[in-house]
Image (tube, rainbow, N blue to C red):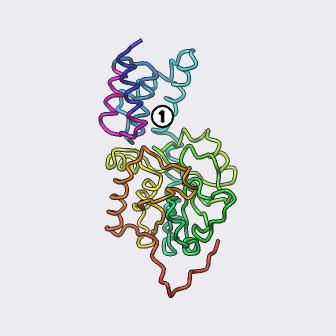
């Protein structure tokens, strides 16, 4: 057993759990593989490069192909080989082309509705303090994230109910009650890995196209933040590239949270791997550049608009 490779692997695993994405983590993965070039170390190395949005060097791709072809008979080696195959198939092939075409259709769909407003509704608990549900639902497109409807509670006055685009983390298993027009799975473009996920299969059974965010958007955020971006920052970064003009609004994202941090209540904790302060600063820059804005304040003299589905 390579004790140095094991120590480097465990150290890198700890860095990843803490959300420390950067050159230091990539170097740890490379050193571990150099010391012990087995399928586990190669899988961790390739996944690290994917997590950071970077293409694999050609010689690593050849090593990846060779490892997939000669996987041993031990269960762990077969498992690592399957993961390597998923990473390899995420680089090129018909699924990559199909996803690019689906994204282009999604962008065109949003641009056609931008004049009516696109509202991105985050899950910060502060949105419950503002009864803006009707105004949210009055937008032409409403995007929401993961679980946002507490069971047994009607939060329509604060949150609205409309759902056109559902954004879900890879570990979100609870599907929305409504059937959205589109679904977006966050993360480092898991377009191949998600094929076997139950929630993706269930969405497709409803006729919902399931997309991923382009890897280049993810990489730019990782480089900027030094950490994996939250779903809200990732989706906003993608939307700001689509030329939606002044119609892109947000609420419940990049806010200084007091009290309950989530619409589901205090038991639901925000992710600890994200660089929240740096994300707020980045969103502030987008706002200053006119790429998006908070949901406009309602004049006290003006009645709330009627909600529509």
In the depicted structure, whether residue 233 falls above or below residue 128: above
* Nearer to the camera, 75 or 18: 18
Extreme-top residue of the structure: 1
> Quick one: label 1, few (<14), some, or many (20+) residues within 10 Å?
many
Residue 291 part of the magenta-drawn span:
no
Residue 47, horizontal then vertical, whole percent: 44, 33
Magenta segment main secondary structure: helix
Give the structural element (helix, strand or loop) at label 1. Answer: helix
Residue occupied by mark 1: 87
- Of residues 268 and 242, the one drawn nearer to the viewer in this rendering: 268
- Residue 242, position as x, y percentages in the image: 42, 62
Can you tell which quarter of the image residue 272 is in?
top left
The residue under the point 57% across, 53% down is: 146
Residue found 43% across the figure and 57% down from its top: 238
Quadrant for the C terminus in the image = bottom right
**Looking at the rendering, in which quadrant would you find the N terminus?**
top left
Q: In this view, does 194 lie above or below 109?
A: above
Residue 78 lies, in percent from the top left, at: 56, 21
Asked if the magenta segment contains residue 27, the reply would be: yes
Can you say whether 110 is above or below 166 in the image?
below
Where residue 236 appears, x then y in whole percent?
Answer: 43, 59
Is residue 175 shown left or right of residue 55?
Answer: right
User: Which segment did they paint magenta?
Assistant: 15-34
Please tell me which residue lies in front, 5 or 299: 299
| Residue at 48 percent of width and 34 percent of height | 87
**Which residue appears farthest toward the front when viewing the image?**
259
């Amino acid at each position: 057993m390579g004790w140095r490779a094991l120590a480097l692997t465990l150290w890198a695993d700890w860095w990843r759990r803490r959300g420390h994405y950067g050159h230091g983590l990539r170097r740890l993965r490379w050193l571990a593989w150099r010391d012990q070039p087995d399928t586990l170390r190669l899988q961790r190395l390739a996944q690290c490069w994917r997590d950071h949005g970077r293409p694999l060097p050609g010689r690593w791709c050849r090593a990846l192909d060779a490892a997939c072809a000669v996987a041993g008979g031990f269960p762990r080696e077969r498992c690592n080989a399957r993961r390597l195959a998923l990473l390899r198939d995420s680089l090129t092939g018909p699924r990559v082309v199909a996803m690019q075409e689906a994204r282009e259709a999604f962008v065109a769909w949003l641009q056609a509705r931008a004049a009516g407003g696109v509202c991105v509704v985050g899950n910060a608990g502060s949105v419950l303090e503002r009864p803006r549900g009707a105004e949210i639902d009055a937008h032409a497109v409403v995007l929401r994230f993961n679980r946002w409807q507490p069971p047994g509670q009607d939060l329509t006055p604060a949150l609205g109910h409309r759902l056109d685009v559902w954004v879900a983390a890879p570990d979100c298993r609870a599907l929305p009650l409504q059937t959205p027009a589109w679904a977006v799975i966050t993360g480092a473009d898991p377009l191949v890995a998600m094929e076997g996920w139950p929630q993706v299969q269930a969405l497709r059974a409803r006729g919902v196209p399931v997309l991923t965010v382009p890897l280049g958007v993810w990489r730019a955020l990782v480089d900027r933040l030094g950490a994996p971006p939250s779903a809200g920052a990732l989706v906003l970064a993608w939307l700001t590239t689509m030329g939606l003009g002044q119609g892109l609004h947000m609420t419940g994202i990049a806010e200084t949270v007091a009290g309950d941090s989530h619409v589901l209540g205090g038991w639901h904790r925000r992710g600890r791997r994200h660089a929240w302060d740096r994300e707020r600063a980045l969103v502030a820059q987008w706002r200053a550049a006119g790429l998006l804005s908070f949901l406009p304040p309602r004049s006290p003299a003006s009645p709330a608009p009627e909600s529509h589905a």
